[in-house]
Amino acid sequence: MKWWFKKKYKFYMPGEEIKVNRSFYNYNIEKDPLGSCKARMSWAILGVAAVYLCIAIRTFAVCWSGYNPSSDKKADDDEMPQIMVENPITRADIVDRNGAIIATSLPTVNLYAKPFKVKNKEEAAEKLSELIPDMLYEDILARLNKKTKFVYVKRNLSLAQKYQIYALGIEGLEFENVEKRVYPHKNLFSHILGKTNIDNVGISGIEKNLNERLTTSDVPLKLSIDAGVQDTIRTKLSAAIEKFNAIGGTAILMDVNTGEVLAMLSLPDFDPNLNTVPDEREQFNFATKGLYEPGSVLKIFNAAMGLDSGKISLTDKFDATKPLKLRYNVIKDYRGENRWLDLQEILIHSSNIGSAQIALKVGKKTQQNFLRNLGFFDTLKTFEVTEKAHPNVPRRWGEETTATVAYGYGISLTPLHLISAFSAVVNGGIYHDPTLIKHDETPEGRRVMSEKTSEKMRTLLRGVVVKGSGKRANVAGYEVAGKTGTAQKLVNGRYIDKKVMTSFMATFPVSDPKYALFLMMDEPKASKETFGFATSGWNTVPTAGEIITAIAPQLNVKANYDIDDKRAKMIEAAYSR
């Protein structure tokens, strides 16, 4: 038998006193088993309470210090320092003058890989190619096979793609939360806004020039642009370019009293949402960077210069009976009147001979000072896009230059230079720096000519639309005034007769000017409808008339047919005498 069965037990007779063993063993086990159980439960409760107290203390410490466990660097985090850099502040929205969003940022993700962690690269590439349709299996595999510790596989994935790839459970693939710039109106504002690169950093237009403003404040940037007006002008200009088979065109609408640009277009344009690189012509902003010799449009400023100098009056007449012979040049008129002309007639018939005589009478110094004061010698530095050009001003300014500049040759300017100066001509003589930012208050400008000169110029320009080459823009009720210009293109140092750039500069309503419109077409073609002519009066002028008819109600410009008809009859009566 086992040894524990050999234990001797003492038996007691009836009435015999029982002797109790007071040992520790017998006390806990035999005498008070319930007390032992209570003691153990107390110790257990005490232990659990201590654990929870530690957790509570640790939780309080984490909350107090702002510690984030997910920010702990793992052993291999040093291999990809790009991911540890904090994302910049959200890029601010850009809105038009009415608050419509024209540029915004949306959340997206970048897929990157640590190639040394991806075990079966062929299988991973095959699965990824099924979920990323715009990437080939070979391209993905090539990235996964790179001998590097970090590589981007695909940027700007949708959230749905992120979850699908995450569900694959492929080790070595990770995601980076980023933002993607989105332009809801596609091409409509491409040359104004520009675009951002794949890292959401501005590379052109406002996005580049105001990159710091857009990345240091989440307050939307409000532009002076009117999205509805911009869309209307683009539709009309696109149709005209197609109709006249031009290779491009430009349009700018400006508030003459503030310098605010309400619309600005350069066609062809591009879609900034696409990652493809636009061709050179599409990404070229002709409105702010396109230098060209404007031709007869410059006669506006030549006439204003003559009047403001005090050396020319409305009643002065100039001999346009024959070409003007200079030392190295002979100046002729296109379809000349072959008679003496006053200032109004010089503008109506667009006389090169008369314009040259005005400039020569005023003098070189006065001409230079006047044009410099209008900003024709400097880059428009305050304008908010990156793409800006410096005017091409003649180095030698002799008699020949004085004469040719008077009718639009010898000096190259951008459309924005022209419309900014034109606004001063018609608004009372105050020059305002052009801007794409909406003003809460009317900005201060600087006087560049007298108010009387401006008033006279409005009358002269109205006559060009009523009686001259601008007749097709004489929209009833809106009192349009302006000047046409057709300039031969300079190609390889030679002027080409059949290649022209046609322009029309207009303001409305002329009795109380509010807006200026500039329109230009690059190499419009003649047709049967234009009777074989490709001059401004046959293409940009009627297009401007259509645009003004469409946008005037959008701008809340009320038609005033009575005043318009009265002015037309007065001018007609004056010329019938």
Image (cartoon, rainbow, N blue to C red):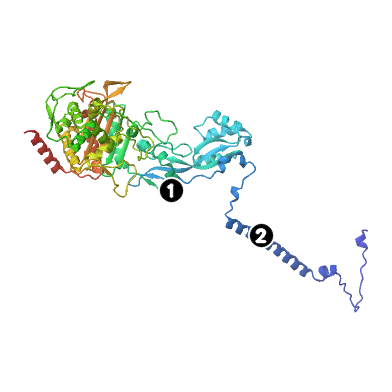
Name the residue carrying label 1. Answer: 218
Report helix, strand or loop for mark 1: loop
Give the mark nearer the N terminus: 1 vs 2: 2
Name the residue carrying label 2. Answer: 54
Is residue 450 at all visible to an observer of this figure?
A: yes
Horizontal and vertical percent for residue 6? 93, 63
Number of labels in the image equals 2
Name the residue located 22 percent from the left edge and 29 percent from the top edge.
406
Q: Is residue 425 left or right of residue 30?
A: left
Q: Residue furthest bottom?
A: 15
> Where is the N terminus found, in terms of image quarters?
bottom right
From mark 1 to mark 2, how far is it between C-alphas?
Answer: 42 Å
Amino acid, disc 2: Cys
Q: Is residue 125 above or below residue 321?
A: below
The crowding category of the residue bearing disc 1, from other C-alpha atoms within 10 Å (few below 14, some 14 to 19, many at least 20), is few
Horizontal and vertical percent for residue 567? 12, 40
Name the foreground residue: 506 vs 341: 341
Q: Viewer-nearest of labels 1 and 2?
A: 1
Horizontal and vertical percent for residue 352? 19, 27
Amino acid, disc 1: Asp
Name the residue located 60 percent from the left edge and 50 percent from the top edge.
69
Name the residue located 27 percent from the left edge and 34 percent from the top edge.
236
Q: Is residue 275 above or below residue 555?
A: above
Q: Is residue 155 left or right of residue 9?
A: left
